[in-house]
Image (spheres, grey):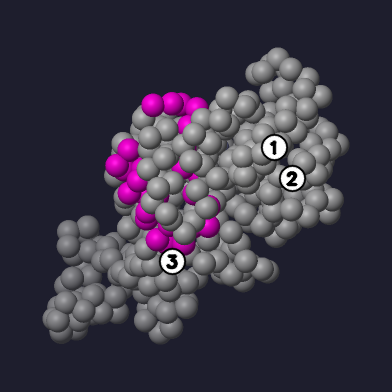
Amino acid sequence: MGRLKLLDTTLRDGEQTPGVAFTPAQKIDLAKLLDAIGVDIIEAGIPAMGGEEMRTVSAILDLGLGAEVLTWNRLNLKDIQQSVDCGARHIHIAAPVSDLTIAKKINKTREWVIAEMQRAVAYCKDRDCSVSIGAEDASRADGNFLLRFYTLAAREGAARLRYADTVGIQDPFTAYEAIKKIREQIDIELDYHGHNDFGMSTANAYAAFKAGADVISCTVNGLGERAGNTPLEEIVMAARHLAGAEVNIDTHRFPEISKRVADYSRRSVHPGKAIVGAGVHAHESGIHVDGLLKDERMYQPYDPKEVGRVREFVLGKSSGKKAIDHVYRMKGLTLSPHQVDAVLAKLKQGQA
Ligand SMILES: [Zn+2]
């Protein structure tokens, strides 16, 4: 597999999580950290919200980050002009493409969406901005209309297209088929944006990448509306380890950025959360600890050091003698066989 580009939308889709609002200073801090870990594209916010959001987006643009800083816009020229006024050079425009969203949300027609999209792309190009065209609710759109929409966006001069599984209804098979079909017809950069309503977002993003998506939209800790977006840490590690993809992200800093986002969003990370959960590199079972002491590949799929963590042995009800001996040794204490037996007996009673 080739290189996977990461588009982080913690500052936009992540902040849309009910009850989550970052301060301007927190957004600037997170933008710097996202850039430092190597994220390719940072979706910084929605200038159309005006006032403070515009000032924050401008401040992020002024940081001179290595990452592309993208602003999110609805399909209207007023929104786009507000992005331009902030100093944005990269504009994302989300256009509704399913009949449900076209008819019920904006009360328009498919032809209106196409014409308006073309007008919006031309407007951005006239202002020397690169354009990403998003297809909102793409997973519920008519396939032929979607292809036509993308083809015309590419022809008009869009630099990137986004496929949004807005309500998280795809599975890895449908995501793969949908992206493959688009990839066969269109050769500009393609970004997959999925939600986690059925717990499928990482698997779907992974399938989309395998089908030819160049960019995956994600958020730190999977923050986002409802069940959230594809977690950055999960898709990075899956693409690297399962697909053998090149991913230029400094994974050693995952604990730092995960904690920062958890603190700022006041949304704690479940201990069992893949990659960044506090408990996912800990082992208690006697059989597992014994196996790990023989060969660390036995019960861990990757070295925890890669994600800035250390393997931990936790003593508890299912611990064995070797684990007890090892844990005490790590603390500089050597127990006699009798003492190991005594500790084991206490652990079995839940008293140690
Ligand atoms: Zn979204």
Q: Earlier in the sequence, mark 1 or mark 3?
A: 1
Q: Earlier in the sequence, mark 2 or mark 3?
A: 2
- Amino acid, disc 2: Gly
Note whether 192 is above or below 79 in the view shown: below
- Amino acid, disc 3: Asp
- Amino acid, disc 1: Val
Question: How far is the residue under mark 1 from the one under mark 3?
Answer: 34 Å
Is 46 in the magenta? yes
Which residue in the protein does label 2 denote?
157
| Label 1 with label 2: CB-CB less than 8 Å | yes
* Helix, strand or loop for disc 3: loop
* Helix, strand or loop for disc 2: loop
Q: Is residue 333 left or right of residue 92?
A: left
Which residue in the protein does label 1 denote?
121
Which of discs 1 and 3 lies nearer the camera? The answer is: 1
Which residue in the protein does label 3 denote?
250
* Helix, strand or loop for disc 1: helix
